[in-house]
Amino acid sequence: MISQTIKGKSHNKHVGYAGEEFVSKFLQKKGFEILDRNFVIQGGEIDLVCMDGNEIVFIEVKSLSSKSEIMLEQTITKKKTKSLIKTCRVWLSRKNLENCDWRIDFVGVIFGRYDKIIAVKHIKGAIF
């Protein structure tokens, strides 16, 4: 459970971390292998990098409260899409894997009361 006493950005950071931890376990149960976490370059970040069979999968994780007025899909903006693609290409280049099959998936997690996860949405190939 995430502390209810944490407010503002710190609380959001904890919710985001909890969402990423949940998603990594969720994906591992589906057979994904975690290769990397929180890869950061100037202007971009990848939450998780996984293998799904023979394909590299970059995972964008978004955690929202059930009280949020926006839908999970609305968090994937054109700016975020452009940044993710650029960051993925840098990751691939640094690993000398430019010729590998890859995709970007989106996994949204919705937290309800007492910071319990009430919904998970995995969209394969969400960005391209």
Image (tube, rainbow, N blue to C red):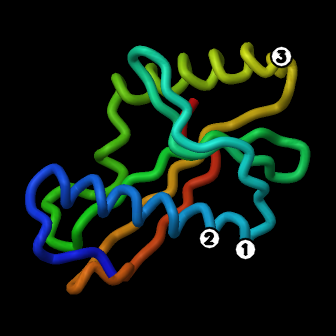
N-term mark: 2 or 3: 2
Amino acid type indicated by mark 1: Lys
Q: CA distance from mark 2 to mark 3?
A: 28 Å
Amino acid type indicated by mark 2: Phe
Question: Residue at 74% of width from left, 44% of height from top?
Answer: 35
Residue identified by numbered label 1 = 29
Element type at mark 2: helix
Q: Is residue 80 above or below residue 34?
A: above
Residue identified by numbered label 2 = 26
- Residue 1 vs residue 30, the one in the foreground: 1
Question: Residue at 30% of width from left, 60% of height from top?
Answer: 14
The spot of residue 53 in percent (x, y) is 88, 52
- Give left or right: position of 40 versus 70: right
Amino acid type indicated by mark 3: Asn
Question: Residue at 54% of width from left, 64% of height from top?
Answer: 23
The spot of residue 44 in percent (x, y) is 44, 24
Element type at mark 1: helix
Q: Is residue 115 above or below residue 24?
A: below
- What is the quadrant of the N terminus in the image? bottom left
Q: CA distance from mark 3 to mark 1?
A: 28 Å
Residue identified by numbered label 3 = 96
- The quadrant holding residue 18 is bottom left
Question: Residue at 61% of width from left, 25% of height from top?
Answer: 88
N-term mark: 3 or 1: 1
Cβ atoms under marks 2 and 1 closer than 8 Å: yes
- Residue 128 vs residue 46, the one in the foreground: 46
Circle 3 residues within 10 Å: few <14, some 14–19, many ≥20? few
The spot of residue 31 in percent (x, y) is 80, 66
- Give left or right: position of 55 versus 4: right
Element type at mark 3: loop
